[in-house]
Image (cartoon, coloured by chain):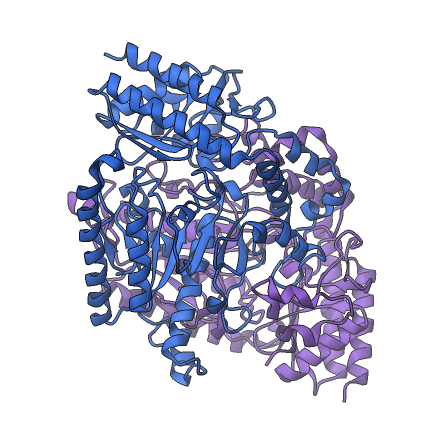
Chain colours: A purple, B blue
């Protein structure tokens, strides 16, 4: 269906290595080989020397552009060598300076209400361990913080209840929270993610299907959100009755892989209140939305929650995975949340520098400015090409627009790439924009010019 | 129960940072803070300047010692900077040299029969994705390689069968395969790993409980292994009848976290044949045993399998996670196995250098030599202190010995640490030895001398 997934058809250069097909498993997914040495800032260079304005940025995981001088310096600072060469088992033998490095990096940007942070190697591990943290918290509440019974201790070793309880996580249709088996049970965006993999019987609520621009459909959208929230409460009750109580609710501030689906702050505030009312933890998955791309460091800061989330997970632009949580979700014993590496201190070194650059260069303001220009430009394009484009939407530079169908979307993307603009897709027929935080207004104009050229040529 | 898990009681230095308790989640698990800059080779230095012979090596994840010059050079080579600073989405936009780097590193050490490799960020993600690969392979066989039905496509999005089929992975009591939800369903070594986390109803076979030294109990051990294999076949039949067929069998060559439990090559060969007979994939988890520590690069090379494994997963000493598999386990479509990073090319740079050092310095022979000396020394100690020690066992330097109970084991470990020897534990009362590959005979003697001193003082 999707040109970009067909490998060779999308490879636009003669030096692209066909022989690699023998070696690399996911060759069908490979768009092209890159020359990262020559890539700079917002521009990605392929092995044939083609230079592209990159607004996909390694699936939204490059915070301040390619080969940023501040990050190069981390590498050449002799004080940092040890952090790269000696990867510790962070949970048991942390480096002397690790607490300071955490204060400088992750703790300096902790979302409101979050006092603890646990690093992990990637987004999936972050969500898996966040789910475990919520299960542990929920069962401790149920047990009245008593020691587990002998029956629990015995049954847990053989995967049976009550030691391995029938608890569930409520997720939303269209959500993406990762693809390991726990995460995958809460992911519902594409068949290719899910097919043939065993799963859990966990409740799935509808995510609001809003009309855009949001300002023009306030009443209709509020109705749709109310419908979804009612369904959430029904599911919580139903799954409790089934004997599989909902320990936590997980949600993205903007459903990304699922097609850039937005909801209002009012929806999220009410959802948080429902979680509180029913004793479920509230987990905000900021793996794709976090790191400044919406104009605030965390997308959920746009909601103005009085009662903060219980867990906030991150990865991608943060360069390390991990999750924050409230004090009361701290597991009661060590080793309940644990693995060999528990993250990677060398990634925290890079993150500290990224945060310095964000602060020094006021990049969140830059994102807000560029984001406005980008969204205005997308509105103009959909007005000019209403038969091709619709539903422009976004927050900061986290923007998207729909094509009339997937073939058109894919064709626009290929043509844009041949003109030097590399974009990503999501959902069924959506183009998503995920530029770096150093994406400035003149990059926006370059992007819009190329898109306009492609659309003008499109029959 | 376990002194080392009680945090402060195990911290043997005044500069150990108490304030960090506010910041780091797993503080109770922290043994001590380290000065990695000052650590060298087999010697780990703590923040108070105490220098210890380290035979735990960050939970068996340091291949050639701390601050190895060959690894320092990777950092200072300007050609490598880009791989650290620009982490790609490897599945879609690999660096130009990535196929070559894979040939130099992971493919140069591929186990017999393994033609494909997929990198991942850590051991858990490696096993999760290896399981998914086996499920996909199994369902494709069942479907006759036809396209999925509409019903499968529809049901998979809501976590229901047949799209999310009731398939299972058979694992062994005492096994450890990681702690994300899929892996955790196959992990059965400690209560603390499992309690309160929902799981799958998957079959769990007994792992042989052998008597050591293996050479002296050949008949008894063969009987015990036959009993376990019979149970494996019974479980496969039973779970098929339950409607939850076994898609794969996962096993460690030596159960590590579970207490260093060995089995004979004959056991593994017969297990492989059972998997073949029943159409289950055979997955060897070499996360802890791989990388040379048993005297061969892969522990399962000791078995002499005629019919190779289907999947071999790795991490730790390999510095990157991942798994090898046979051609026929290649998923039929791209993106079925996928995530944002799919590993980290900077780790492959380090791995290439590690492999160069292993070859140049014949480290596998070194391991075999040191391992023999270590095991002989442990035999001598258990003969000398039969009321304290028993069941010395090992392959290469992957050795272990049991104390009479957990309190004695923990006390020996603390006393040894105060004398400059840092060891790890596993199982209920086992001390495990997991030195680097540059652990030479004089290190063995140093280790044995300290242990002997501790035991002599022990009342």
User: Which image quadrant for residue A57?
Assistant: bottom right
- Residue A129's place in the image compared with A266, above or below, is above
- Residue A48's place in the image compared with A220, above or below, is above
Residue drawn at 53 percent across, 20 percent down: B47
Q: Quadrant of the N terminus of chain B?
A: top left
> What percent of the width, then of the height, locates residue A35?
76, 57
> What percent of the width, then of the height, locates residue A434?
67, 62
Q: Quadrant of the C terminus of chain B?
A: top left
Count numbered badges in the picture.
Answer: 0
> What percent of the width, then of the height, locates residue A364?
70, 51
Identity of the residue furthest to the top in this view: B457
User: Which image quadrant for residue A96?
Assistant: top right
Viewer-closest of A268 and B349 = B349
Residue A304 seen in this snapshot: no
Give the left or right position of residue B276, taking residue A376 as reference: left
Residue B126 seen in this snapshot: yes
> What percent of the width, then of the height, locates residue A30?
64, 67
- Residue A459's place in the image compared with A427, above or below, is below
Give the left or right position of residue A425, taking residue B128 as reference: right
Viewer-closest of B129 and A109 = B129
Residue drawn at 27 percent across, 43 percent down: B191
């Amino acid at each position: 269906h999707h040109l970009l997934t067909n490998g060779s058809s999308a490879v636009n250069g003669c030096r692209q290595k066909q022989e690699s097909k023998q070696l690399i498993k996911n060759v069908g997914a490979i768009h092209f080989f890159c020359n990262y040495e020559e890539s700079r800032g917002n521009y990605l260079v392929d092995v044939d020397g083609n230079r592209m304005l990159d607004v996909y940025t390694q699936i939204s995981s490059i915070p301040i552009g390619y080969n940023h001088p501040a990050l190069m310096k981390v590498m050449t600072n002799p004080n940092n060598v040890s952090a790269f060469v000696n990867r510790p088992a962070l949970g048991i033998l942390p480096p002397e300076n690790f607490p300071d490095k955490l204060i400088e990096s992750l703790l300096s940007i902790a979302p409101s209400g979050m006092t603890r942070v646990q690093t992990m190697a990637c987004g999936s591990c972050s969500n898996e361990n966040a789910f475990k943290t919520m299960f542990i918290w929920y069962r401790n509440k149920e047990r009245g913080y008593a020691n587990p019974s002998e029956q629990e201790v015995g049954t847990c070793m053989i995967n049976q209840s009550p030691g391995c309880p029938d608890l569930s996580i409520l997720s939303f249709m269209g959500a993406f929270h990762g693809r390991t088996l726990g995460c995958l049970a809460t992911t519902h965006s594409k068949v290719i993610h899910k097919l043939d993999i065993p799963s859990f019987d966990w409740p799935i609520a509808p995510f609001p299907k809003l009309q855009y621009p949001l300002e023009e459909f306030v009443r209709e959208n509020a109705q749709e959100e109310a419908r979804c929230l009612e369904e959430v409460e029904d599911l919580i009750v139903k799954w409790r009755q089934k004997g599989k109580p909902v320990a936590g609710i997980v949600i993205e501030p903007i459903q990304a892989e699922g097609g850039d689906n937005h909801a209002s702050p009012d929806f999220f505030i009410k959802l948080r209140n429902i979680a509180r009312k029913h004793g479920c933890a509230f987990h905000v998955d900021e793996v794709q939305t976090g790191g400044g791309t919406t104009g605030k460091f965390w997308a959920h800061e746009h909601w103005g929650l009085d009662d903060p989330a219980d867990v906030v997970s991150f990865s991608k632009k943060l360069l390390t995975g991990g999750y924050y949580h409230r004090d009361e979700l701290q597991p009661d014993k060590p080793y309940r949340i644990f693995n060999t590496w528990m993250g990677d201190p060398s990634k925290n070194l890079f993150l500290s520098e990224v945060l310095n650059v964000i602060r020094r260069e006021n990049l969140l303001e830059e994102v807000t400015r560029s984001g406005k220009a980008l969204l205005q430009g997308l509105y103009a394009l959909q007005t000019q090409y209403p038969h091709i484009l619709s539903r422009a939407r976004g927050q900061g530079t986290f923007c998207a627009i729909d094509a009339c169908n997937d073939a058109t979307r894919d064709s626009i993307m290929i043509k844009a790439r041949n003109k030097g603009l590399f974009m990503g897709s999501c959902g069924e027929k959506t183009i998503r924009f995920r530029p770096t935080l150093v994406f400035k207004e003149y990059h926006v104009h370059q992007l819009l010019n190329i898109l306009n050229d492609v659309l003008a040529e499109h029959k």
